[in-house]
């Protein structure tokens, strides 16, 4: 047994502000990172080329960082419960450290891996790193899990938050002989996304890696956080942080993010600024709320939380679904949003709510189809946040307000009043009047001239139909 600790990275693709890694560093400098390319995830049908491209980019940066401080990030491909214990055994590691995840698959995987490590007599330790507060730390007074966001936020926001972990300056990596041994049990060079079968040629909204995420945080703090509350709902404005992919893959530590925003809060005397910072922190709390929900109710990943939606009589018209996916519904704000996601792998939050409401309440299509399509496109696609957002929009989740229906025209009038966002993503409609764009009241002749489809459904009719179906199923539950 050597004093080596193998640090298994998963959703923490960084060195700084990493609780598991920092704890390993308190014990030894001999730490080597490993990332497992898991075929179960890579061969799944809810994976996005943009997301894989971002992840591989983060791994590349992480490898460089390890190298700079004297160690290595090993890459291994295969079933984690075989390859991780095997590698640890071959390198005679004294322990495997890793940070925990809330997703059902990750929990199962980790259970298998740790059982096998135990069987081989290899120690392991795990930590909560990706959340400011671990699931069991935020419970009601009677020790129950929160199912409603507002009381969760009240409790969560009052708890003391940890500071970022101390910097890791120097590590000791494997020697030539050990590297040779590692390659005998399957370590490989980092493949490109293309090598793995994922083609993404458009630029990513955020460059991969820790440095780019930190710079983006700085930019957001300097330029946008002060007006976040005011600007966050306008999709044509860069009013949000666009840090979601970095938070999903842990290219940035959540404590670092929290500290930067708290500093703005503490150093400002303006109510407007403080309210804006708080509004942004509330979004971080939504992120944690949905992760806690996924941790305690893993069945959410499989379907509706509320009973009346388990057997909902969806229309599931395949042509309508295709039109929605391609951004060809004839509703400009919906189509602009879908084209944004198809093109850049990201969609503004306001528009995610609009298109999700449209799919479920106007097209009466099962939200799970939309949930999956989002996961196939988003570079920030994340099971908990995506599932939470979809169940909220479909009214099938924990949200106490049941029938939320968005009117695409009023949404566009309110949040894209000049039609800038619509014009950006629907070039064929650029020449139309703003009024036509935001109300969607475009004559059949104009639609024909612009090669833009007629509306595939009527909003008023469909929302009545959705409500009728809902009332019917509610009576039967
Ligand atoms: P900011 O406004 O800057 O927010 C900061 C961070 O808070 C985000 O990066 C994100 O980590 C978190 N956050 C913000 N809003 C939410 C929210 N409503 N729920 C959970 N976390 C939130 N977010 C994802 O990260 N991955 C997804 O797959 C995802 N799918 C969604 C699907 C639907 C139908 C809806 C309505 C929302 C979804 N969201 C998802 C939440 C939200 O739209 C994105 O987090 C946000 O648009 C990302 O942009 P940003 O980083 O600029 O956000």
Image: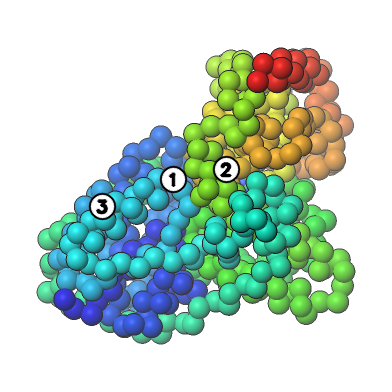
The mark nearer the N terminus, 3 or 2, is 3
* Residue linked to disc 3: 81
Separation (CA) of disc 3 from disc 2: 27 Å
Of labels 1 and 2, the one closer to you = 1
Separation (CA) of disc 3 from disc 1: 16 Å
The mark nearer the N terminus, 3 or 1, is 3
Residue in the foreground of this view, choosing between 55 and 460: 460
Percent of width and height locating residue 7: 33, 68
Residue in the foreground of this view, choosing between 476 and 253: 476
* Ligand 1 has an atom within 8 Å of the beta carbon of the residue at disc 3: no
Disc 1 residue crowd, few under 14, some 14–19, many 20+, Cα 10 Å? some
Q: Which mark is residue 104?
A: 1
Q: Residue at x 35, y 68 (%)?
A: 125
SS of the residue under disc 1: helix
Q: Which mark is residue 356?
A: none
Disc 3 residue crowd, few under 14, some 14–19, many 20+, Cα 10 Å? some
* Ligand 1 has an atom within 8 Å of the beta carbon of the residue at disc 2: yes
Residue 197 vertical position relative to residue 324 in the rendered view, above or below = below
């Amino acid at each position: 047994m050597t004093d080596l600790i193998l640090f298994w990275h998963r959703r923490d693709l960084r060195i700084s502000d990493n609780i598991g890694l920092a704890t390993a560093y308190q014990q030894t400098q001999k730490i080597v990172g490993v990332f497992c390319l898991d075929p179960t995830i890579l061969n799944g049908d809810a994976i996005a080329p943009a997301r894989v491209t971002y992840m591989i980019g983060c791994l590349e940066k992480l490898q460089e960082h390890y190298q700079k401080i004297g160690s290595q990030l090993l890459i291994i491909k295969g079933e984690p419960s075989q390859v991780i214990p095997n590698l640890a055994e071959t390198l005679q590691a004294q322990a495997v450290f890793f940070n925990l995840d809330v997703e059902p698959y990750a929990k199962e995987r980790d259970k298998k891996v740790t059982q096998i490590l135990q069987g081989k007599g290899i120690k392991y330790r795990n930590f909560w790193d990706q959340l400011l507060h671990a699931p069991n730390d935020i419970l009601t007074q009677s020790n129950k899990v929160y199912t409603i966001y507002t009381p969760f936020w009240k409790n969560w926001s009052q708890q003391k938050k940890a500071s970022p972990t101390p910097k890791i300056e120097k590590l000791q990596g494997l020697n030539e002989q050990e590297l040779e041994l590692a390659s005998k049990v399957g370590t490989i060079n980092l493949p490109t996304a293309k090598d793995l079968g994922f083609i993404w040629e458009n630029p990513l909204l955020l460059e991969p890696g820790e440095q780019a995420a930190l710079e983006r945080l700085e930019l957001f703090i300097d330029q946008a956080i002060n007006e976040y509350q005011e600007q966050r709902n306008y999709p044509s404005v860069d009013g949000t942080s666009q840090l979601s992919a970095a938070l999903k893959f842990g290219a940035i530590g959540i404590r670092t993010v929290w500290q930067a925003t708290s500093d703005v809060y503490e150093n400002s005397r303006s109510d407007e600024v403080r309210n804006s910072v708080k509004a942004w922190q509330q979004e971080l709390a939504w992120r944690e709320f949905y992760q806690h929900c996924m941790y305690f109710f893993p069945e959410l990943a499989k379907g509706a939380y509320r009973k009346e939606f388990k057997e909902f009589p969806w229309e599931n018209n395949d042509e309508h679904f295709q039109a929605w996916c391609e951004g060809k519904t004839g509703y400009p704000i919906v189509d602009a949003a879908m084209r944004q996601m198809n093109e850049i792998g990201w969609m503004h939050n306001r528009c995610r709510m609009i298109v999700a409401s449209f799919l479920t309440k106007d097209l009466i299509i099962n939200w799970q189809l939309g949930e999956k399509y989002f996961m196939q496109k988003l570079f920030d696609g994340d099971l908990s946040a995506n599932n939470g957002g979809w169940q909220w929009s479909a009214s099938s989740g924990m949200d106490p307000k049941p029938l939320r229906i968005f009117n695409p025209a009023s949404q566009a009038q309110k949040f894209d009043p000049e039609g800038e966002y619509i014009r950006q993503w629907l070039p064929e409609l650029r020449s139309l009047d703003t009024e036509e764009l935001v109300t969607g009241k475009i004559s059949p002749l104009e639609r024909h001239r612009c090669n833009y489809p007629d509306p595939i459904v009527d909003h008023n009719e469909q929302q009545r139909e959705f409500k009728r179906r809902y009332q019917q199923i509610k009576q039967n539950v």
